[in-house]
Image (cartoon, rainbow, N blue to C red):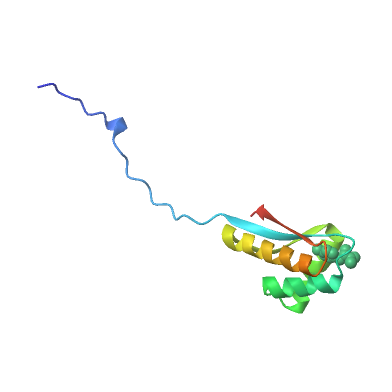
Amino acid sequence: MTHIPRDSNTALKPEIAKPKLPPMFKVLLLNDDYTPMEFVVETIERFFNKSREQATQIMLKVHTEGKAVCGVYSLDIAETKMNQVITYARKMQHPLQCILEPA
Ligand code: TYC
């Protein structure tokens, strides 16, 4: 009978439990020269559940700085928000652009 030595380094070590948080994504609007400010404010209110005051601040940040964060979500929700914004803007014939960035 052949003896197979045990190698303690190849034994499975119990994993230290790490709480797994989902990767998060920022949803940003980009500035352009054509989309009306009022439309951008209404879009932020509608899809990102912001007050008129919050939406106006975000719109002005996009207008002056080129982009701003509207919200941070898990990937599937962030993608849904981005697609809702782009679909709505195109339907209304505005070139508004919406992108995701890792948070
Ligand atoms: N720059 C646009 C204008 O002057 C307004 C605007 C703001 C457009 C934010 C897009 O994401 C945007 N009418």
| Residue positioned 86% across, 61% down in the render | 64
**The N terminus lies in quadrant:** top left
Q: Position of residue 92 (x, y in %)?
A: 80, 70
**Ligand 1 located in image quadrant:** bottom right
**The C terminus lies in quadrant:** bottom right
Residue 76 location, quadrant: bottom right
| Residue positioned 39% across, 51% down in the render | 17
In the rendered image, the residue lying farthest to the top is: 2
| Residue positioned 83% across, 60% down in the render | 31
Q: Position of residue 26 (x, y in %)?
A: 66, 58
* Depicted 99 relative to depicted 7: above or below: below
- Residue 56 visible to an observer of this rendering: no
* Depicted 98 relative to depicted 52: above or below: above
- Residue 60 visible to an observer of this rendering: yes
* Depicted 28 relative to depicted 55: above or below: above
Please state if 4 lies on the left or on the right of 54 as rendered.
Answer: left
In the rendered image, the residue lying farthest to the right is: 33
Please state if 45 lies on the left or on the right of 19 as rendered.
Answer: right
Residue 43 location, quadrant: bottom right
| Residue positioned 67% across, 74% down in the render | 49
Q: Nearer the viewer, residue 92 or 22?
A: 92
Q: Position of residue 62 (x, y in %)?
A: 81, 62
In the rendered image, the residue lying farthest to the left is: 1
In the rendered image, the residue lying farthest to the bottom is: 52
